[in-house]
Amino acid sequence: MHIFGTFTKLRPLSFLQHLARSHDSTCVQVLSNSIVWLVFLENGKITYLTHSVEPFDRLERHLRRLSSQIPHLDNQIRTQMRMMFETEAEPIPTTPMLVAEFPPLSQHPPEYQAICWLVSERHLNPTQAAILIQELVKEVLESLLLITEGKYRLVSPSEKLPIICRIDTEKIIDICQKKNQAWQSFTPYITSPYQRPYLRVPELTNQTNSPQIQQNLAVWMKGFSLRHLAVIMNQEEMQMVRNLIPYILNGEIILHEPDPPFDLLPKIPQPQTRSTPGETVPTPTAKASVTENSTSPSLISAAVGYPERKTSGLPLLKNETATNPLPSVTSSQISQPSSQPVLSNSAPPTSSSSKKIYKIVSVDDSPTVLREISRFLEQENFAVVAINDPVKAVMSIIRNKPDLILLDLNMDGIDGYELCRIIRNNSMFKKIPIIMVTGNRGLIDKVKARLVGASGYLTKPFTRAELLKIVFMHLA
């Protein structure tokens, strides 16, 4: 039996609180702006929460954040996981969907299946998986609470979701509400955590009085969102944004709108404030604060259905109740550049201080494609070796010893699958990222790419930002 409703009459916050207090066990499908959210509840507690915008990109970011504490969960395992479980994304409709057009709930979310696989293969233990799920739920719940209109229905999945953990619904709602208030304190300068910061053109950047931006951020501001950038730089999200705000105000950093489909997620509303005549910077009213390492009861109840194993340096669940403190920003704080380095207490593995110039080999039998790839990458100080004869590619790759390989899939003489398999058979290149570049979008091609050892997939036609994003992701 399905129950339909609309958020023009009932807001997500009060609706979820009602389900939690009623101890309901159900799945809630929410539809707003052509994006679908799924909330799985067991006796009023959240067991999983996701939305339809790039779920595997979201999972990848949170796995990367855990990677320092789970060193054996490397890029190769993450790539294998994506190749196994990531399905071809359905195109997001350009016109609003009707309630009757809710997608059928026939199986578990594929990224949740991937998490279960990581546990079953012992790449994650149940405690680590519970912490991972909690962080994923926080991010998705933040956006769900910002919805102002939408439709919902309560459904019963055909198969019950295997439960890894149960999360206290009301407590995590409170944390996400405070995080949204913290984001509100940066409006109107920032309206979405998925906005993309860029440094101004190099001639102007060279005149800046903020050398720490050049040294620590220039190498990473290549199309990543604020949220993704915080993960790559190993910084707490709000702290990074607070450090960037002065340079956004003085024009040294420019924010672009989110890439599709992230642009469809709800924007951060500006808090209602009274302005004083002559005041140019509004004083935020949000007083967001979340206590780190709180001694209050855990958000997560014990994992069930999986044998517990020793954690690998992760915090105990009883202390995993919140992210870092999120104090609000005042006008006095953002009117002057911060005196603190942008990368305080963080050291990404490939910061510009290392002065490393990465070497990339690009193999494609199209001179036009090779020229474009070389132009895009050489502008970012990569050393690019272009190879247009796939038959001679192996010896050239061995000779050049690249840090990353871009490999066209469809070439005359030898295809990318066979070339990738040959390269992987050489012990020198077992862990070198190999990115397949192709016009094919099918799931079968991705499975074949995984079987021969590909690290990722770049679909033609691609933009400069898309190329740089996947390159930096695999070299980070």
Image (cartoon, helix red, strand yellow):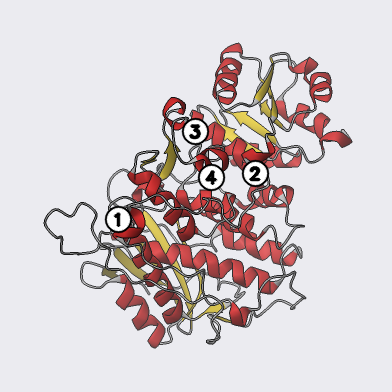
Q: Which of marks 4 and 2 is nearer the N terminus?
A: 4
Disc 3 target residue = 465
Label 1 belongs to which residue? 187
Q: Say which amino acid is labelled 1.
A: Thr
Residue 274 relative to residue 382: left or right: left
Q: How far, Cα to Cα, is label 3 from label 4?
A: 21 Å
78 vs 97, nearest the viewer: 78
Tell whether label 4 touches label 3 (CB within 8 Å).
Answer: no
Q: How many neighbours does mark 3 have within 10 angstroms: few (below 14), some (14-19), or many (20 or more)?
A: few
Three-letter residue code for mark 4: Glu
Q: Residues under labels 1 and 4: Cα distance?
A: 35 Å
Quarter holding the N terminus is bottom left
Q: Tell me which numbered mark, 1 or 3, is placed earlier along the sequence.
A: 1
- Viewed as shown, does residue 18 lie left or right of 116? left
Real-space Cα distance between discs 1 and 2? 30 Å
State the mark number for residue 476: 2
In this image, 336 relative to 217: left or right? left
